[in-house]
Amino acid sequence: MAVLLAVCQEFEIEKENNINPQIASAFAGGIGNTGSVCGAVVGAVMAIGLKLGQKDTMEEALQNLTVARDFRSRFEAEVGSITCRELTGLDLTSDEGLKKLMSSDTPQTVCFPAVGAAYRIVVELLKEMD
């Protein structure tokens, strides 16, 4: 949610489209703590869609998909993975994994930097489009 909200603010998307970034809140922990795709990645990809909008032609739609692909590539190269489980090394579907997450510095050393990287990369890509 943080990445989506920050990008909406950066590009004033909220004001233009009345978008509620809360829509991304369940992506934490890799889609509801399942360890799947990092919520920061999902938020960034959602932001790409919001900023670039739906296109009229297949060629334009493919250009949007290229931006999303480039985001994934840059994020993965910088952060190491796009999945929460690989990034954190924890199984967040278990009580033990959640306890380890909450009692460790993983949010500060893994999650917050991933959010920062996602935000920076998606803003760079979207500004390249302007």
Image: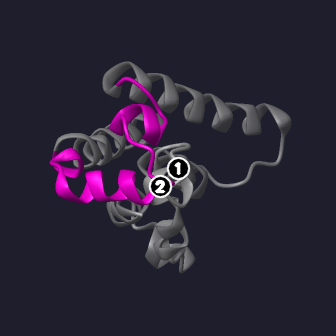
Task: Kindly identify the residue that appears in the image at 32 percent across and 23 percent down.
Answer: 78
The answer to whether residue 52 is magenta is no
Task: Kindly identify the residue that appears in the image at 82 percent across and 48 percent down.
Answer: 56
Quarter placement of the C terminus: top left
Question: Can residue 8 be spotted in the picture?
Answer: yes
Give the label on residue 83, or none.
none
The type of colouring in the image is one colour
Task: Kindly identify the residue that appears in the image at 44 percent across and 41 percent down.
Answer: 84
Q: Amino acid at mark 1?
A: Val
Give the label on residue 42, or none.
1
Task: Kindly identify the residue that appears in the image at 38 percent across and 66 percent down.
Answer: 5
Asked whether, in this view, residue 64 is left or right of residue 11, the answer is right
Quarter placement of the N terminus: bottom left
As displayed, is residue 47 above or below residue 122? Answer: below
As displayed, is residue 8 above or below residue 57? Answer: below
Between 42 and 33, the residue placed more toward the observer is: 33
Between 46 and 111, the residue placed more toward the observer is: 111
Image location of residue 88, percent across then percent down: 34, 39
- Mark 2 lies on residue: 94
Asked whether, in this view, residue 50 is left or right of residue 117, the answer is right
